[in-house]
Image (cartoon, rainbow, N blue to C red):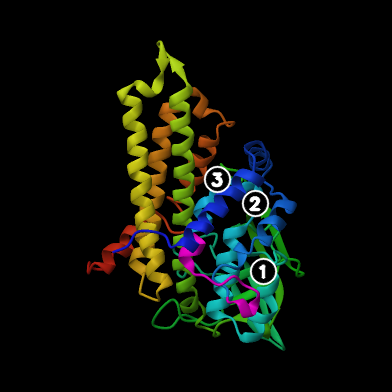
């Protein structure tokens, strides 16, 4: 077994970390975090690195590479995501969805624009009455009309959608068969299409997430992703990629928090010296390191499996659940070390803590992740 990154992967990691240090000063990131916006110029600089094209073949303008390379970049840049923009949503819900489900014409049309940063994507899948029960609660429908489809319905928590150019919309096109996944199709709708309305949902970390309403929205036949009535099956591989990406970002936030807390402990003085000399503080910091390394290992293992075309459903779900839980506990311990400063909204650690808290709930709650894991381990289905 070899746990080392290749020289190319190490170079990629160093370049991504250097990009954050050079282009994403803390005050810039804090400003955009407070405003709930990102920096368009920084987005273009990020696109110019070629990292939006990781995992996309060169024939479509991409940089090549695989999901492990993507995880490396997402981990390194997570602390600055508020300023950089919707890289993860575009790479996963745009790039991976098109690669896995798109026709050659769709790939040739959209992937070069995605790589250049000129096409941003968001996933619109969660139903107002469903949450994790996506299929059972599916009320959004798409009806066949001449030349395309008409979508009607609504979605919740369509993140990174305010400035998205395209929305990946999941809708029911036929009644479910023996399985609820039958009869579900995936569409690539223009964000600016008549009938699309977004309403901002205020959330704890000021992330860009919206309720999306579709009122007789027309989508042409050439904007169907994958097979009609079998689109959900095509999404499954992309959803594994989503869990890996989220796991990698959680590791990135945990590592950034650990770095911040360690620096604080070595500079903050109380009772005649730095607080890092106290064993209680040292134990919090050591535990943060353990939790972060555990999360990194399971995320990288799952990413390696997918990069090598190995089954990774169990591992990707495990990686997301472990990374979210470990990162949250690590950052919560860091809050104890920072004390009152950690409770202020000016603390970067506080921002990471709020970011990670979401991913114990989404995109699949960790309780539902445990249900899936138990089923993979041979237990009877519990839901």
Q: In the rendered structure, does residue 67 fall within the stretch colored magenta?
A: yes
Q: Which label's residue is closer to the chain start, 3 or 2?
A: 3
Q: Quadrant of residue 374?
A: bottom left
| Cα distance between the residues tagged 3 and 2 | 10 Å
Do callouts 3 and 2 mark residues in contact (Cβ within 8 Å)?
no
Q: Which label's residue is closer to the chain start, 1 or 3?
A: 3
In the rendered structure, the answer to whether residue 173 lies left or right of residue 7 reads right
* Above or below 175: residue 335: above
The answer to which of 100 and 156 lies nearer the viewer is 100
Residue wearing tag 1: 114
The answer to which of 252 and 32 lies nearer the viewer is 252
Residue wearing tag 3: 79
Q: Which label's residue is closer to the chain start, 2 or 1?
A: 2
Q: Quadrant of the N terminus?
A: bottom left
Q: Position of residue 319 (x, y in %)?
A: 37, 58
Q: Position of residue 211 (x, y in %)?
A: 63, 57
Q: In the rendered structure, does residue 317 fall within the stretch colored magenta?
A: no
Q: Position of residue 171 (x, y in %)?
A: 57, 74
In percent of the image, x 55 and y 49: which residue is there? 17
Residue wearing tag 2: 84
Q: Position of residue 44 (x, y in %)?
A: 72, 58
The answer to which of 168 and 326 lies nearer the viewer is 326
The residue range painted magenta reads 57-71
* Above or below 202: residue 139: below
Q: Residue furthest toward the front?
A: 7
Q: Quadrant of the C terminus?
A: bottom left
The answer to which of 66 and 215 lies nearer the viewer is 66
Do callouts 2 and 1 mark residues in contact (Cβ within 8 Å)?
no
Does dot 3 land on a helix, a strand or a loop?
A: helix
């Amino acid at each position: 077994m070899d746990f080392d990154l290749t020289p190319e992967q190490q170079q990629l990691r160093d370049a991504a970390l250097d990009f954050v240090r050079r282009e994403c000063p803390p005050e810039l990131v804090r400003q955009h975090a407070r405003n709930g916006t990102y920096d368009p110029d920084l987005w273009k600089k990020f696109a110019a690195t070629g990292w939006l094209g990781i995992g996309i073949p060169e024939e479509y303008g991409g940089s090549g590479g695989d999901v492990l390379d993507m995880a490396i970049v997402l981990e390194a840049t997570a602390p600055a995501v508020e300023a950089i923009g919707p890289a993860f949503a575009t790479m996963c819900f745009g790039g991976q969805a098109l690669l896995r489900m798109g026709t050659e014409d769709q790939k040739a049309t959209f992937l070069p624009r995605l790589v250049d940063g000129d096409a941003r994507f968001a996933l619109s899948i969660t139903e107002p009455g469903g949450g994790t029960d996506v299929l059972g609660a599916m009320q959004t429908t798409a009806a066949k009309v001449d030349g395309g489809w008409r979508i009607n319905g609504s979605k919740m928590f369509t993140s990174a959608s305010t400035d998205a150019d395209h929305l990946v919309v999941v809708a029911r096109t036929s009644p479910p068969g023996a399985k609820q996944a039958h009869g579900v199709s995936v569409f690539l709708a223009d964000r600016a299409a008549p009938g699309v309305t977004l309403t901002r949902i205020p959330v704890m970390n000021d992330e860009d997430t919206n309720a999306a309403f579709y009122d007789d929205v027309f989508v042409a036949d050439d904007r169907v992703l994958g097979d009609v009535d079998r689109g959900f099956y095509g999404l499954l591989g992309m959803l594994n990629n989503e869990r890996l990406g989220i796991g990698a970002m959680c590791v990135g936030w945990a590592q950034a928090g650990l770095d911040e807390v360690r620096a604080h402990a070595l500079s903050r003085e109380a009772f005649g010296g730095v607080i890092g000399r106290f064993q209680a503080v040292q134990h919090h910091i050591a535990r943060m390191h353990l939790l972060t390394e555990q999360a990194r290992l399971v995320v990288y293992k799952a990413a390696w499996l997918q990069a090598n075309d190995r089954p990774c459903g169990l591992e990707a779900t495990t990686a997301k659940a472990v990374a979210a839980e470990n990162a949250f506990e690590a950052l919560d311990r860091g809050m104890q070390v920072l004390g009152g400063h950690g409770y202020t909204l000016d603390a970067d650690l506080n921002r990471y803590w709020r970011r990670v808290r979401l991913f114990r709930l989404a995109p699949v709650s960790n309780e539902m992740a445990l249900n899936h894991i138990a089923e993979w381990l041979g237990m009877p289905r519990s839901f």
